[in-house]
């Protein structure tokens, strides 16, 4: 397993950006890619620092890309950067030019935690032709369905710049995106999990209930645990198994 720290220039964001990547030393290229997204208060180094992700993928013919999403919720801001365009279009193009990666939907999966859980579904449902599977751990899944409630005036202003005054029915709204993807006939395989002591548990229950009413098949599980790295380090392993199934890859021994 090789570890890479890459800095490159994003034309979409008009700035230098970074990512961590884990490259397999087993199997034959080109390899499938798993894009693994961080939460609101973290950066692209956090999965490598707080989990055993490198150990968990040691026998897999899989590239893991951990990009920096800043505080952007991986969506195109009403006033500001186009993070969805960067993540779903520019980033895969860079990765596929730079690494021995597959270049089609069947070779791309995406997942994340908290803000990154929302982001993974925002990108997978907003660009269903790009990803074969997506998962969310402890996601803020109703973030774009109603104006977020916060007592912090700076955070209110920040969220308004991202979402506008009312994001319902927009490309920030996972419910809207799910309905659109279902109507279009292409929906990535979805897996969602959340801890029973997580403050975002109701977000997850509400969103998965909506998926049922739309008729979108998905995996949903609740486990003991809170919004913590103990929970994410444990359950990222199930996310990996889910994606390996849909990417059609098995451990190489």
Image (tube, grey):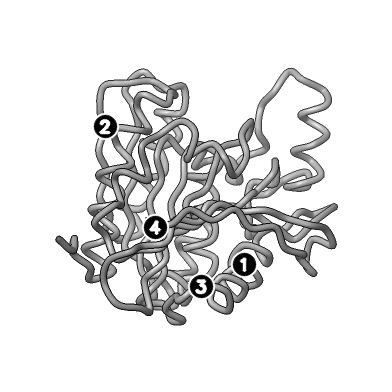
Determine the CA span between mark 3 and mark 4. Answer: 21 Å
Q: Answer few, some or many: residues within 10 Å of disc 4's Cα (few below 14, many 20 plus, some between 14 and 19).
A: many
Q: Position of residue 2 (x, y in %)?
A: 43, 57
Q: Relative to the observer, which residue lies in front, 194 or 55?
A: 55
**In the visual, does 118 lie left or right of 183?**
right
Judged from the image, the secondary structure of the residue bearing numbered disc 3 is loop
For the residues bearing labels 4 and 2, Cβ distance under 8 angstroms: no
Label 4, label 2: how many angstroms apart (C-alpha)? 17 Å
Residue 35 in picture, x, y percent from top left? 47, 58
Q: Which mark is residue 222?
A: 2
> Up-down: is 235 above or below 26?
above
The mark nearer the N terminus, 3 or 4, is 3
Task: Identify the residue under disc 4.
Answer: 134
The mark closer to the camera, 1 or 3, is: 3
Q: Is residue 99 left or right of residue 93?
A: left
Where residue 91 is drawn, which disc sits there?
A: 1
Which residue is drawn at the image coordinates 59% and 53% (left, top)? 5
Quadrant for the C terminus in the image: bottom left
Q: Residue at x 40, y 39 (%)?
A: 137
Q: Which mark sits nearer the N-terminus, 4 or 2? A: 4
- Give SS at disc 2: strand
**Quick one: label 1, few (<14), some, or many (20+) residues within 10 Å?**
some
Q: Quadrant of residue 98?
A: bottom right
């Amino acid at each position: 397993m090789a570890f890479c720290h890459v800095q490159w220039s994003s034309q979409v964001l008009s700035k230098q950006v970074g990512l961590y990547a884990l490259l397999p030393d087993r199997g034959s290229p080109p390899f499938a890619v798993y894009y693994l997204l961080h939460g609101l208060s973290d950066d692209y180094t956090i999965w490598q620092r707080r989990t055993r992700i490198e150990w968990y993928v040691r026998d897999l013919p899989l590239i893991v890309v951990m990009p920096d999403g800043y505080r952007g919720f991986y969506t195109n801001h009403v006033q500001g950067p186009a993070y969805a365009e960067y993540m779903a279009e520019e980033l895969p193009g860079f990765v596929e030019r730079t690494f021995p990666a597959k270049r089609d939907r069947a070779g791309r999966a995406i997942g994340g935690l908290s803000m990154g859980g929302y982001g993974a579904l925002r990108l997978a449902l907003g660009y269903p032709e790009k990803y074969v599977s997506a998962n969310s751990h402890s996601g803020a899944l109703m973030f774009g369905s109603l104006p977020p409630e916060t007592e912090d005036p700076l955070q209110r202003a920040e969220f308004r710049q991202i979402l506008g005054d009312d994001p319902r029915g927009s490309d920030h709204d996972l419910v809207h995106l799910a309905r659109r993807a279902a109507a279009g006939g292409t929906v990535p395989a979805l897996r969602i999990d959340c801890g029973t002591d997580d403050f975002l548990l109701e977000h997850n229950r509400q969103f998965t209930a909506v998926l049922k009413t739309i008729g979108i098949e998905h995996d949903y599980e609740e486990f003991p645990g809170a919004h913590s790295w103990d929970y994410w380090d444990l359950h990222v392993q199930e996310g990996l198994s889910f994606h390996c199934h849909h990417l059609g890859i098995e451990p190489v021994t």
